Amino acid sequence: MSDDELTDIRKQKREQLESKLRGDGGSAAKEASAGPAEPIHVDGADELDDAVASYDVVLVDFYADWCGPCKMLEPTVKKLAENTDAAVAKVDVDANQELAAQYQVRGVPTMVLFADGEAVEQLVGVRGYDDLKNLVEAHLA
């Protein structure tokens, strides 16, 4: 994630919080809660923390480039990013071993679902689009 992207996310989150404090339910709050249409590639705990803080629901895909099931899951992850209001993040476990250990990722693919800043679900293995979409939408407010 570039510095500009992080700055934009922080700005959206600030506007969302200010809107909540004002109680005006402004459009900034709605924009900030909707996830981007493409998966966010996360490199490190700080970037993951920023993504989780910026969106109401975040599905994090812990993957490895050499992993066959991860490659099978890739189109599903992209489709989820396009078709849900949740943000979808991708974490390469080889490049982020400490982050993977922090979330007790022992095999790939592993997906961790965050809702309101907290890890609420962890799934291991390839799952179908409908299963993942239903899981994500159950946590969207």
Image (cartoon, rainbow, N blue to C red):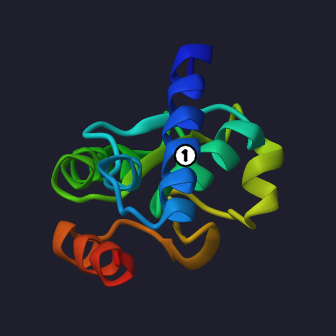
Looking at the image, residue 107 lies above or below residue 47: below
Q: Quadrant of the N terminus?
A: top right
Q: Quadrant of residue 121?
A: bottom right
Q: Which residue is depicted at the point 29% across and 72% down?
A: 132
Q: Which residue is depicted at the point 63% across and 73% down?
A: 119
User: Which residue type carries mark 1?
Assistant: Lys
Q: Quadrant of residue 112?
A: bottom right
Q: Quadrant of the C terminus?
A: bottom left
Relative horizontal placement of residue 117, taking residue 8 as reference (left or right): right
Question: What is the tally of numbered marks visible in this picture?
Answer: 1
Residue 102 placed where, x, y %?
81, 59
Relative horizontal placement of residue 71, taking residue 92 as reference (left or right): left
Looking at the image, residue 120 lies above or below residue 29: below
Q: Which residue is depicted at the point 24% across and 55% down?
A: 80
Element under disc 1: helix
Extreme residue in the bottom direction: 138
Q: Residues within 10 Å of mark 1 (few under 14, many from 20)?
A: many
Taking depth in this image into account, of 13 and 105 the one nearest to the observer is 13
Residue 54 placed where, x, y %?
54, 49
Looking at the image, residue 98 lies above or below residue 6: below
Residue 49 placed where, x, y %?
69, 49
Q: Which residue is depicted at the point 61% across and 53% down?
A: 53
Taking depth in this image into account, of 73 and 1 the one nearest to the observer is 1
Q: To which residue does mark 1 refer? A: 13
